[in-house]
Structure formats: C-alpha cells, structure tokens
Amino acid sequence: MFTTYLSSSFSLIVILFTSLIFISISSLQTPKHYVVYMGNPIEADVHNSEAYYLQMLDTLLPREESERRKGVHHYKHAFRGFSAMLTEEEAAALSGHDEVVSVFEDPMLQLHTTRSWDFLDSLSGESSSFPIYNSFHGSSDIIIGVVDTGENTITSLTLLNRDSQEIDSRSIWPESPSFSDKGFGEIPSKWKGICMEGPDFNKSSCNRKLIGARYYKSTGATSARDSNGHGTHTASTAAGAHVVEASDRGLARGTAKGGQPGCRIAAYKTCTADGCPGSAMLKAMDDAVHDGVDIISISIGLNAAFKSDYLSDPIAIGAFHAELKGIMVIASAGNDGPIASTVTNVAPWLFTVAASNIDRDFQSSVILGSGKVIRGAGIHFSNSTRPKAYSLVYARNAAAASKPVEDARTCLPGSLDPKKVSGKVIVCVMPRDAVTTKQIIKVVVEDAGARGLILVNQKEKIRASDFGHFPFSEVDMTDGYKILKYMLHTKSPTVTIVPTVEVKPTKPAPVVAFFSSRGPASLTENILKPDVMAPGVLILAALPPPKTAKPSTPKFGLASGTSMSCPHVSGAAAFVKAQRPSWTPSMIKSALMTTAITYDNMRRPVTNTSGLTSTPHETGAGEISPQRAINPGLVFETTTQDYLQYLCYFGYSQKTISKTLNKATKFSCPKKTSKDLISNINYPSISIGNLRRGQRKMIERSVTNVGPERNVTYVAHIEAPEGLVVKVAPKRLVFGENVDKVSYKVWFYGEKSASKRYHHGSLEWSDGYHSVRSVFSVNIN
Ligand SMILES: *[C@@H]1O[C@H](CO)[C@@H](O)[C@H](O)[C@H]1NC(C)=O
Ligand SMILES: *[C@@H]1O[C@H](CO)[C@@H](O)[C@H](O)[C@H]1NC(C)=O
Ligand SMILES: *[C@@H]1O[C@H](CO)[C@@H](O)[C@H](O)[C@H]1NC(C)=O
Ligand SMILES: *[C@@H]1O[C@H](CO)[C@@H](O)[C@H](O)[C@H]1NC(C)=O
C-alpha cells in the first residue's frame, strides 16, 4: 500500500503519516546504515545544521528509538546530509524528500594496497623516483589531506590476493622522522583543522608538518595513531620529510623522502576491520574541506565489481563538492588488473592513478651445483653471509603416498612427503588458482621442513615480494626449465639461494604494474580512465617502528599497489601547486596529463608486463613528470559547467542535478543530451566508447595558454592508428595579447575495414618548445 505513497512526491507530513503506518512492519526490519546526501550546503546556515537533520529524522523514526534519532554523521561543510541507521522503508521515504539528492546504503570501500602488500622489514634507501624533489627545500603552505586506513586488521581482503599480508594499519605514526617539522615555518593561517586526541595521541603528536589528525568514532577507532603501516606509508610517500642515512642492517643506505617534503600533512583515519565505511569517508572529506586542505589523497575505492553510480559513490560525491571549492582530489585506480574495465574512482572530477614499477628491482638469485646462476625475483633476508648449498628436490617427485603428483607439483597442502623434502630446497610450480606465495611457503616449511623454495611462475611477470628470513626465489618458465633440466641430468643436484640484492637501474621502467586496474571505465566509456600512471611497485616509505623500539626510530618498508602510486601524484600535484598557486585542480591535472611520459628508460614506448606496448587504458596519459608539468604551455580547463553537463549527459535529471548545487548557481541541462556527448566535455584526453565503421564523429576541445609568451602559435601533430582517420581544424592555434583561449575540432572516422576494437593514438600541439599531448581511445564497432 505504501508503494503508492512512496512513488508520489513527498512532504514531511506524508512521511509522518506513512511512518505511523509502517512502524509495526519496520520494527521487524533491522535498520542498516544509510547515507542521506542532500547536495551543496545552503547559505542560510539553519538548513545545514545538525538540528535540521535531527528534525528530518525525528518525524520519521519511532519515538522509542532515541539512539537512531541522533544519526551517525552530519555533513555540512562541503555538502549537506547525514548518515543514520534506517530501515529500508525509512530510507525510501527519505529519498522522496524535496531536499534529498540520494539515499544509499553505507558502502564498504577497500584499501587499494592489498595486492602485493609486501612490507619489507629491512630495507631503506631513496624512496623517490623523482630526483627533482631534492632541489626543493623549506616548507610550503600546501596542505595535503590524506584520507586513509583504520585501526584494525584487514582480514577480509587477504583471500583475494597473492602475497598479501594482513595489515593492521592506522592513520599516522606521528613520531616518524618523516613527519619531523624541522625547518618548517608557522602553520598557514588558512588551516582550521584540529589534532584529535586519543589515549596514545595528544596535541603534541601534531607539529608544523603533521598539522592535523582526525579519526571517526563510528568506525570503532579511538585514536589517529597508525600502529602498523598503510597511512604512514602513503602520507610519507606524498610528503615525507628528508630522512638521511636511513638504513637497516646496513642494506640500501640512503635518503628517504616523500614527493613534496615541504608540504603539510593532515591525516584522516576512516577505516575499520572490514574496510572503509562510505559514511566515514564522506565525513573525512567534509572535514578536510572545512579544515582548509588544498589536495585530498585517497588510496581507497569501491570494489570494481560494485557498480554504483555517482550519487551513491561516497568518493565521487565528496570529490565533486571538494572540486567545486577548488580542492583537488586524487584517487587510486584499484588493484584489480590486468583484467579490462576494472578501474574505479572514474568520475571526471577525480584524478585517477594507475601504477608502474620504478627503475629499481630486487633480485634473489640461485646458484646451481653446476655453477650456473639463475636470476630470480624475491626479497628475503636469510641471515647467513655465506649461504649454504642444499640438496634440490622437485616437488613432483616428493609426493606423499597416495597423493596425486599433480598436487605435489604445485605444493598443495598435505601433498608432500616430509621425508623427501625436509632439509632440502624444493622447486614448486605456482598453482593457477588463488594461492599466495606465503601459503606455499607455509606448506613447504611447516608441513615438509624445506630449507628454501624456488617457485616457478607460469603466468605472471615476476614481482619481487618480501618473504622475511626464508630463502626464496621466484623464476619464470624458461628458467624453471633450466633448473629442472639440471636436476634431470645430475645425480645429486644442489643449489644455493643467495641473499637479495638491489638491481638499479632496472630496465625497462616504467612498466605498467600487473595488478594495476585497467580501463575502459565501466560507468561510461566516453571518459578515458585511468588518467595517469605513477610509481606503485615496491615503493619505500615510512612505517611505524617495532613495538619495542623508541617511537621516533626511523623505520621504512616497501609496499606495492595503486595506493602507493596515488600519493606520488598527490605529491606531484602539490609540487605544481606550490609553483603555480593560482591554478585550479583541472589545470594542474591537465598539466600533469599532457606532459606525461610515454617512453621508458630504454627509449621505447612504455610496455605492460607481457612486454607489449601499453595502451591508455593501462597508463592513461602516461607516467607523470612533475618537472615538465610546471611548464605545460597549454591546459585544458574542465569547469564546473563541464561537470554539470556531464551529469546531464550521463542521464541525471535537471531536478536532481540542481539539488546538488547552490540555489544561486544557475544551471540548466542542454536540450539535447545523450551519453555520446560525454566525449565532448573539455577533458585533457578523449574517449569515444562507440564509433561505428564508416561513421564520423566530431569532438570539440578548448585550450588555455599558460605559457610565458602571449603571442604564440601551436601546430598540430596527429598519431592515428590504422583503421582510424583523425583530422583536426584549425591545424594551427594562434594565441595573442587578448586571445588566451582557443577552440578546435577533431574528427574521428572509423574506416570500413577497421577491426572492431579500441584504437589508440594522440594529438599533440607544439610551439617548438612546449608539447601538449592529448591521448585518445576510440572503440570502433
Ligand atoms: C603526551 O604529552 C606529554 C607531555 O605533554 C608527553 O610526555 C607524552 O609522551 C605524550 N604522549 C603521547 C602518546 O604522545
Ligand atoms: C599487455 O597488452 C596487450 C596488448 O594490449 C594485452 O593483450 C595483454 O593482455 C597485456 N598484458 C597484461 C599483463 O596486461
Ligand atoms: C635467521 O635469524 C632468525 C632470527 O635470529 C632465525 O629465527 C632464523 O632461523 C635464521 N635463519 C637462518 C636461515 O639461519
Ligand atoms: C604580440 O602581438 C601584437 C600584435 O601583433 C603586438 O602588438 C605585441 O607587441 C606582441 N607582443 C609581444 C610581447 O610580442
């Protein structure tokens, strides 16, 4: 019966009335945590106030449920709304309210580090792959808000991934030397944030570098302290101070530093054991906007399988309002690669970051009894300086009685005969299904007493991962055969696994990380995502010290993930912003995109781990180059109007979109709207999700001259793939004293003979000094 009520337009009185009807029904339902999103804050403060939200809840919720009537979070700075425990009917009733844009169940977002989350206890060295940052000293007034992990163990995710450690990660470890404020000036006066206290965190835990910290009680946290990792790692990657002579056990001595050592950091801790509740993420972004941050760095996202639209995606909502206020939001693309269409955080107002390796790798070689050296991957610290030779056994020949040799070959639990393995180094073949290397090590050590493991990896490009003290080496198929051949032809084969060494420079680099999530974006293929790529494989950054050590003990570790690449871009954006303070987020984003590098350190196009030339669906515009981004020549400015038109084209109604805005903002959707028009918003890259063979499509863009010369002419250079004809007009862009913005048109024509798939290329504008590269991806079908 109340379905009819629900579909009609609501007033509070109707809500009151219906709520009386369904009290008895709703009491049977368990309330769940919902977010009620109400758009931009209203000038008149009363409508943004807690009291106002309470009133909305009051009329709706049963009188005896006083706890629920208080709500959980109230949002009021960047956007309006609240979160509360509601039944499905109550949520539906609220979604009919005039001022409500959307109501959605509090989603659980995931950390983006879980793939290959390989902390290394013992390494330290130079953390930055951008030597240019060395030249930047002193403090800047740029504040990076790092929205990051919660306090408990992330257990639910470990099953999904190879080599993931269980993470007990909190927001920040304040005593780390990476957060020292030595040489820092006064805290900028724009800062309005706080340093929230907890049992192990007090006002003196913050300083002129780590200027603020917040945590959220609704997540179960009692302090912003980071006891084991992730938040400290990401914050120090973005903006860690220089720490010289950082070293552990004498390995890889060097200077550790973040992307932008002069930046201030504010930490927002939002996660729990199960992930990061969207309601707390929204609160953190609302607070960050209020506190006065310039950049928000989020290494968290919805699972790629969770197809939510923009109005039920907390990061998209929070970032939209941050963007309206001139705050840049940078987010990780996710670690669900190399499968296509796995990229998350794909709203056009977000800066979405993929991950690459850097020019450093770690090698764990094995020396066969014959003297032959095989270079494998892996990070381990077997403590002996003179490693011993052990007998070598192939797992397939060490099956336990009555166990299939095929199980033994891949070292499945219970498949090995300890008598045949104990005291030897065992060769296992990596199983195809989701078994982690750590699980295999557990099997061969605990079940069978092996002294070392050589793992033959059949499919993935080998990545160095941390395996503590256990002698370990991972080799590819080719080397695996060499080892087996040696064993076959030798009476008593032996092997020595030597300790890990750092290999630098590694070539090629950058290479797209295997785990990095790929485009095209599933919500709309008419915006190219991810946007850029940055280092995210085995990144060294600060960690909390061991429990027994002094809190200020320097401690560094390696981690991999788009979680690690995201703060690199946050640091890079802060670097650009420090040099170009008047630039908007979209200008900074454009500068980092159009100057990105598409060649590796062997001067060849960037490849993926299969060794094949990468596409913009893997790299976006390419690997960021902060130094080049300071002088992009031209920028694509994506305005609020562009984003709003985007929402129209995406399919939201004028009414819904207006609710997200200030009453004062005049906006109406264009008469003609269609998803195809999304390709036309002024974005630094171009994506066309659907171009029929024989069809022509025109795209418009405009560029703004930010170069040193007013009178300057740019000339077009197109690189078009076979099957796609690309034309641009005008071919020359002429800027003058009074002309700093020029538009152009690009036509894409899919040839009749073209193969049905994505075709990629680029349009580059050059004045002989600057080159402004805009990548495009066109799906011909
Ligand atoms: C809290 O502050 C006091 C002095 O103000 C200091 O001695 C103590 O170590 C601090 N505790 C923490 C956990 O930072
Ligand atoms: C590398 O790129 C090629 C061509 O786009 C693709 O077929 C292959 O699956 C990619 N490999 C990985 C590991 O992503
Ligand atoms: C290395 O040292 C650790 C701790 O001292 C010890 O537990 C481990 O057994 C040693 N490993 C080897 C291979 O000797
Ligand atoms: C730019 O061109 C205009 C018109 O040709 C000229 O008047 C002006 O002096 C030029 N400015 C510079 C800086 O060269």
Image (spheres, rainbow, N blue to C red):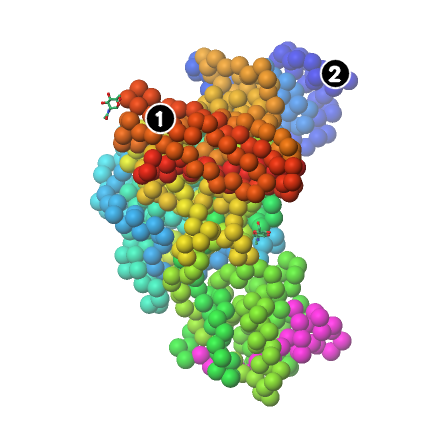
Q: How many numbered discs, if any?
A: 2
The residue most toward the bottom is 491
* Mark closest to the chain's N terminus, 1 or 2: 2
Q: Quadrant of residue 539?
A: bottom left
Residue 341, x across and y down, in percent:
60, 42
Ligand 4 within 8 A of label 1's CB? no
Q: Along the line of sight, which residue is nearer the eye, 750 or 470? A: 750
Residue drawn at x 38%, y 53% as measured from the top left: 541
- Secondary element under disc 2, as helix, strand or loop, is helix
Residue 658, compared with residue 338, is above or below; it is above
Q: Can residue 298 be seen in this snapshot?
A: no
Is 308 within the magenta?
no
Residue at image location 52% in from the left, 34% down from the top: 726
- Which residue lies at the image location 68% right of the left edge and 27% below the top edge? 88
Q: Is residue 305 left or right of residue 516?
A: right
Amino acid at circle 1: Val
Estimate the x, y position of residue 71 in percent, counting from the top left.
Answer: 55, 27
Identify which amino acid the numbered label 2 is placed on.
Thr
Q: Position of residue 337 (x, y in %)?
A: 57, 49
Among the 4 quarters of the image, the one containing residue 304: top right
Q: Which residues are magenta?
A: 387-410
**Towards the viewer: 189 or 151:** 189
- Reading the image, the residue beneath label 2 is 4
Q: Which residue is mark 1?
A: 734
- For disc 2, the neighbor class at 10 Å (few under 14, some 14 to 19, many from 20) is few
Q: Is residue 168 above or below residue 54?
A: below
Which image quarter is the N terminus in?
A: top right
Residue 705 appears in the rendering: yes
